[in-house]
Amino acid sequence: MSAAFGRRVVSQLFAKTAKRSCIRLSTSKWRSTTAVASETVVADKPSKNVIPAPEPGRVQAALLKNFDEPLQIENIDAPRITEDKEVLIDVHYCALNGPDILLSKNSYPHKLKLPQILGYEIVGELREIGDHAAKAGYKVGDKVIALNKQRFGGFAETCTAEFGDIWKVPNSLKLIDAVCLLDGYATALVGFEKRACLQEDDMVLVNVGLGGVGLAAVDLAANVYRAQVIGVCATEDRTTLVREKGAFAALKFHDKKLMKQIVNVAAEKDIKEIFDGVSGENFKKVLSCFTDVYKSGLVKDLLHDNEFSVVIQHLSREGRVIVAGLAVSKYNGKDAAPTGSFGVTGVSLHEYRDKDHEFYRSVGDEVLEFFEDGLISPSRSLVAGLYKINSAMKFILKMKASGKVVIDMKNKEVFTETDDDD
């Protein structure tokens, strides 16, 4: 992290006194015993509730066998670490994120070879460690968070991860809280740091969408940076949650009303003529890159974390506005941009992992510190056991999730909707 960022965070630690709202919430060949995962009342159709009994020396997992079909519960051979840089994790919880659903439908840029175990945002205990982790002071039994965005595997009772993708869970942090933190908040933090150099009292317009990163961006901008946040949301439930996160305004997307709503909200902050002149026209183009995701009417377009973007819009009279959140490209990136077009590029946490690993690690550390200091408070909507994973996917696709959806690998039959007061 930059020295300036560190100084700003120190200056904002008065926020510790604010109420800390805890959340309520390698590809291989498998020999398996198969059953389709059970469904709950949110399912469109009842499905088989035949789950294979656990087998000694094997682990249970939810496998994607065919695209756009329910995941299947199977007993598989327990994974083992094979390289010094690996660790083996006894998985307690794994977040069910938008990309997991898109991957299951073959609608994500990352292409899979089937069969595959999805799930990449994982918390649990170290069961085995390689030399790299041992030299860094990790021990068997340590509680860790893993971002397994290259190898996945989180929807299994145990999985392997690379040492460079794990963080120790602080003693003060519950595992079910920890699983809701790193992916969304780290992505948003990278965007604000690398693309905007966000400052206190900046005006930030966040397109929240349905994924976790948009909501994380609101929380960071409002409560870490102390910016003035406007949220644009897909549902009324999310507008309520965005206001609770500290946004001074939250708007449910309405194509014909949005511009007027933004003008009115900006006027409350003495920002006038926000869409006037050349800079105003450019702002409209920027805004359309973010809000066009709503126009298709497809839920899947609101679940892409790889299209989280941050753009600075300089206004002719009123300084600048930061636009962040889920966005779509205005043209094919392989071709030259048409005259008058405007495009944005997404923030890739995976890219920083490969190109600037030290920064990638420091971002994760900062997110954990923010939570410990009471600056951020992620939200959880549902805890579903492994056997209910298909119902949890339907829950998201029906736009019922305002916060994170978590898969419980220990209590496999649970299906509990939660809120921030639990």
Image (cartoon, helix red, strand yellow):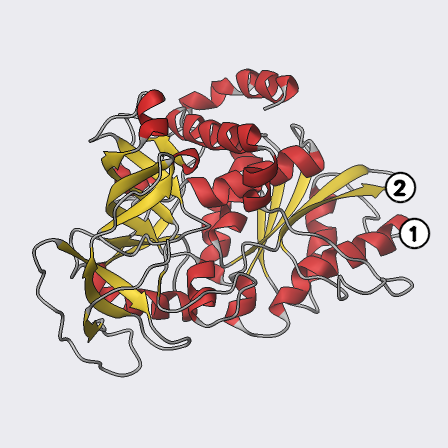
Mark 2 burial class by Cα count in 10 Å: few <14, some 14-19, many 20+: some
Image quarter hosting the C terminus: top left
Separation of marks 1 and 2 at Cα, in angstroms: 8 Å
Asked if residue 358 lies left or right of residue 57, the reply is right
Asked if residue 229 lies left or right of residue 283, the reply is left
Dot 1: element: helix
Closer to the camera in the image, 267 or 294: 294
Which of the 4 quarters of the picture holds residue 405? bottom left
Q: Amino acid at mark 2?
A: Ser
The residue depicted at 74 percent of the width and 42 percent of the height is 321
Closer to the camera in the image, 370 or 421: 370
Dot 2: element: loop
Return the mark for residue 27.
Answer: none
Q: Is residue 73 visible?
A: yes
The residue depicted at 88 percent of the width and 48 percent of the height is 279
Which of the 4 quarters of the picture holds residue 11? top right
Q: Answer yes or no: do the residues labelled 1 and 2 have beta carbons within 8 Å? A: yes
Asked if residue 126 lies left or right of residue 182, the reply is left
Image coords of residue 162 (percent x, y) = 39, 39
Q: How many labels, in total? A: 2
Residue placed furthest toward the bottom: 45
Image quarter hosting the N terminus: top right
Residue indicated by mark 1: 278
Asked if residue 133 lies left or right of residue 376, the reply is left
Residue indicated by mark 2: 316
Question: Upstream in the sequence, badge 1 or badge 2?
Answer: 1
Residue 224 vertical position relative to residue 113 in the rendered view, above or below = above
Q: Amino acid at mark 1?
A: Val
